[in-house]
Amino acid sequence: MVKNSEIIAVFNLRHSQSLIYSDYVKEYAGRYKIVDAAGGEEYASLILTADTMYLSSISSLTLKKRAETGLAGGAVYTNF
């Protein structure tokens, strides 16, 4: 579970020019706990908190829409 207030950034891993996973995750993986929340599916986004990287199968656009539709504030996402 992740509260909206804990999220620092959400990155799109499916964009053809995205180097987030290959560069940032590999370089800084030792600084963060990494949680595979994709349930065996392909990674679509990376959700970054102060101490954890969540790899999710839900697109960054979908996560953004959820935050904008009133789920912000105290929202808690359990199923990335």
Image: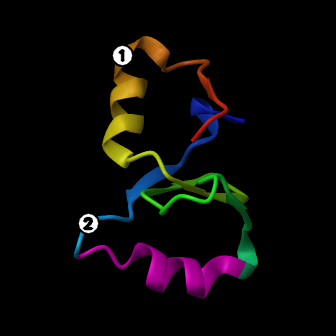
Per the rendering, the mark at residue 69 is: 1
* Residue at 35% in and 22% down: 68
Residue 52 on image: x %, y %: 70, 58
Note whether 56 is above or below 25 in the view shown: above
Residue beneath the point at 59% across and 21% down: 75
Looking at the rendered structure, the kind of residue marked 1 is Thr
Q: What residue type is labelled 2?
A: His
Would you say 48 lies left or right of 72 here? right
For disc 2, the marked residue is: 15
Q: In which quarter of the image is the C terminus?
A: top right
The alpha-carbon separation of the residues under discs 2 and 1 comes to 24 Å
| Pair 2/1: label in front | 2
Magenta segment range?
17-29
Q: In which quarter of the image is residue 51?
A: bottom right
**Residue 79 vertical position relative to residue 35 in the rendered view, above or below:** above
Viewer-nearest residue: 19 or 31: 19
Which secondary structure lies at badge 2?
loop
Residue nearest the viewer, comparing 78 with 52: 78
Query: Residue 25 colored magenta?
Result: yes
Q: Is residue 34 left or right of residue 61?
A: right
SS at circle 1: helix
Residue 77 sits inside the magenta stretch? no
From the top left corner, tell me how far across and down residue 77 is, in percent: 61, 31
- Residue 67 placement: quadrant: top left
**Crowd class of label 2 (few under 14; some 14 to 19; many from 20; radius 10 Å):** few
